[in-house]
Amino acid sequence: MYAKVIVDIPALSLDKAFDYKVPENYQLFIQVGMRVLVPFGKRKIQGIVWQLTNETDVEQVKTIAELLDPYPVLTNELLRLGEWLAKETTCFLSSAYGAMIPSAIRAKPKKMIQRQVKKEQLPPVLQAVFANKQSVLWKELPKEAAFLSTLKQEIERGHVVVDYVLKNKIEKKTILCVRLVKTYTDEEIAKSIHPSAKKQRKMLEWLQERSAEDWVPVKDVLAQTNTSMSVVHTLVEKGFLQKEKREIYRDPYEHRNFEVTTALSLTSDQARVLTDIEKAITEEKARTYLLRGVTGSGKTEVYLQAIEHVLQKGKEAIVLVPEISLTPQMVERFKGRFGSLVAVLHSALSQGEKYDEWRKILKKEVKVVVGARSAVFAPFENIGLIVIDEEHESSYKQEDHPRYHARDVAIWRGKYHRAPVLLGSATPSLESYARAMRNVYQLLELPSRVNRLPLPHVDIIDMRQELKKGNRTPFSETLFQKMKERLEKKEQTVLFLNRRGFSTFVMCRTCGYTAECPHCEITLTYHHTGRLLKCHYCGHEEPLITTCPACSSEQIRFFGTGTQKVEAELTKLLPEAKVIRMDVDTTSKKGSHEKLLQAFGKKEADILLGTQMIAKGLDFPDITLVGVLAADTLLHLPDFRAAERTFQLLTQVSGRAGREKRPGEVVIQTYSPDHYSIQHAKSHDYIQFAQREMYQRKETGYPPYYYMTLITVAHEDVMKTMKTAENIAKFLRHQLSSETKVLGPTVSPIARIKDRYRYQCMIKYRNEPSLKQTLGKILQHYQQEIEREHLLISIDNNPQMFM
Ligand SMILES: Nc1ncnc2c1ncn2[C@@H]1O[C@H](COP(=O)(O)OP(=O)(O)OP(=O)(O)O)[C@@H](O)[C@H]1O
Ligand SMILES: [Zn+2]
Ligand SMILES: [Zn+2]
């Protein structure tokens, strides 16, 4: 027997399966999707078993050194998905698989098997290895064929399960727990416990009341009953209690009680939408739905009830939300409805927490995954629905290998499982909207807010006029007046400041010197915490300068209106207002994000001031005013989606106001008050905006009318970079059809990153069936230089960023 193995080396020449002989003893046990250690040149490296065959063309075939998993880490479906992903995004198969296996599992955990039944129910060979233990390390198991095949059977029967335990820091947490053997009557207690043994009584009573027969951590029992360990020992001896070290999951939400919620009775619009989705779930229709619902129209409630339907069918659901809107509020709504059936995956979790959440999925203990982009790879095997909330968000596209879009992956998986995909947004991406218009997706709409509340009234303030009037504060007169009114009425205000384009940098006022990263062509950003200057691209940091390195002047100033500066102005102008500031600095500590929002929810502050992270998902009833301090920051980015992003962001932020009972107001401050994206945001008119923007895209030849591929070349030698980019452009022009446009090469917007110079070419095309193949040829051509000379050629299909 032979295995075709995808070895874990990201280089093109290796991007195919290698044949290895499967040793006799593993033959019955090995499965596709397991990881193996294989000899490769002089080293041993990891790989994934991709196929098992009975023959090979290779003459001197090497043998698998070690089987690393007792259980496949990738399902058959995910293996196929990886192949598709590699082709679709022009990446290595090993990178595609790498993206699907969570980093916690890649970090070489210990593998164990755990028995789920009484020892006596196991075959004798297994009884022997378990002896008195509940679980045994994979490493310590016999590796004879007979044993392994018995083990496989027992795994398939569910008598034994496979488990992964992380080494060192992130080891599985176990703590000492106790529980009552049964519930006791007063007489039983009186009979065996002397009236003077007050502490024993107290502990028993507490346990009866608190936990019945559930396990409780000993430390909680001792703390709550004010007793000591000796009491526990006595009660165990007397046979009242059982004591055991129990595994506890590192549940990031363990200290929170989620208010249990039940399905709300739907508005007629919601009901209409839900009927369509439920039908698709029941009929196993792999259709993609685009749910366009204005802010506060109750999209989330529709997701929740659709998922309820999925669970009733005995299936599983994946819900993707953008990282920044994966707020406690959002999590709460899913946990509140589905309780412990929900796993949450996002980047703020510790390695150990991520690992625990992932294990719950693998062990089929959860049915719903709520997570950011990579949660789309959740190893469920019976998916009934995939939801993508805020589908227009650019963070659904991974900007690194593999450059996949979660939407495409979701649709692929939907087809595989014959499950519908539900894309939701108040401001769908033009790409999705265009597909809905062509009936590729089915459009569903929630045109008004729940309870018929009006969308907020929007004022647009021309900041040029403010400057003429002599107002040099960040707040227009109108906004300032409205904030004061809110303070008097004890209502809340949200102030939004877009971080991008507003990062604080330092500049010498005498000679104009700005601090730049020595490795990247980009200005350093000032971070208040630690008083550091940091590079956002390579992580380089240096202490804040106070004298200019160029002219020795001490006139060093901060530029850009950061949140800190706005906060300082607020304190000066509205000293009585309590302000909560949310930005990278105040939320860098774990849990701080949640705490700040909770405080605001409890009305401990009047004003919430923040960056993008407050634009989404907030649902607080007392917010009646939203101020956008500078709407232009996104508008002038060198990106054809600038207008779309501006419209989306303004609509989202405005949507935070007036969501319950009291109507909301929005003040948008801008230097371009007449721009159509700002004007249409004022009138909450998505359709008008979309039509106008579509026209623009058609005229200028951008998506959704054209597809784009961005090729970036980077190397330490600027001449070599230029030359390579030129050759690539020439080759493309020669190979591709005459209707396709190849633009460039030009210097990338960020001309140097990590000491490598960067040039880019852009391909715009409508129909280019041989494109992927041509791109593959380019990579092949430069393969040696990529491997040996640090040449970088990155290919980004449907890019979201142009840096
Ligand atoms: N059928 C309903 N009856 C009563 N209240 C509802 C109903 N549906 C939703 N709500 C409430 O209305 C508010 C807004 O709903 P939700 O947050 O789901 O809207 P959304 O469309 O997801 O909004 P956004 O896109 O702005 O985040 C929530 O507080 C929610 O609990
Ligand atoms: Zn200077
Ligand atoms: Zn840098």
Image (cartoon, helix red, strand yellow):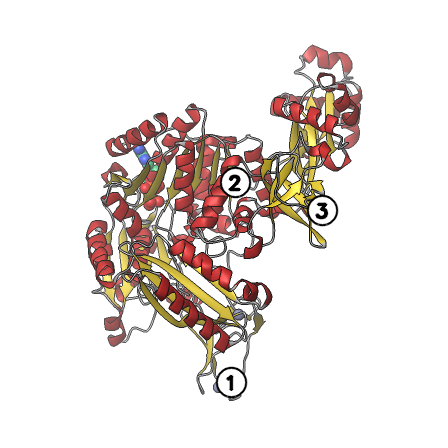
Residue 632 is left or right of residue 325, and the answer is left
Q: Local crowd at mark 3 within 10 Å, few (<14), some, or many (≥20)? A: few
Disc 1 Cβ-to-ligand 2 distance below 8 Å: no
Percent of width and height locating residue 146: 74, 26
Percent of width and height locating residue 517: 52, 74
Taking depth in this image into account, of 226 and 628 the one nearest to the observer is: 628
Q: Amino acid at mark 1?
A: Glu
Cα distance between the residues tagged 3 and 2: 30 Å
Image point 51% across, 85% down: which residue? 554
Q: Local crowd at mark 2 within 10 Å, few (<14), some, or many (≥20)? A: many
Establish if 340 lies above or below 484: above
Task: Name the residue beneath numbered marker 2.
Answer: 79
Closer to the camera: disc 3 or disc 2?
A: 2
Q: Amino acid at mark 2?
A: Leu
Q: Local crowd at mark 1 within 10 Å, few (<14), some, or many (≥20)? A: some
Give the secondary structure at mark 2: helix
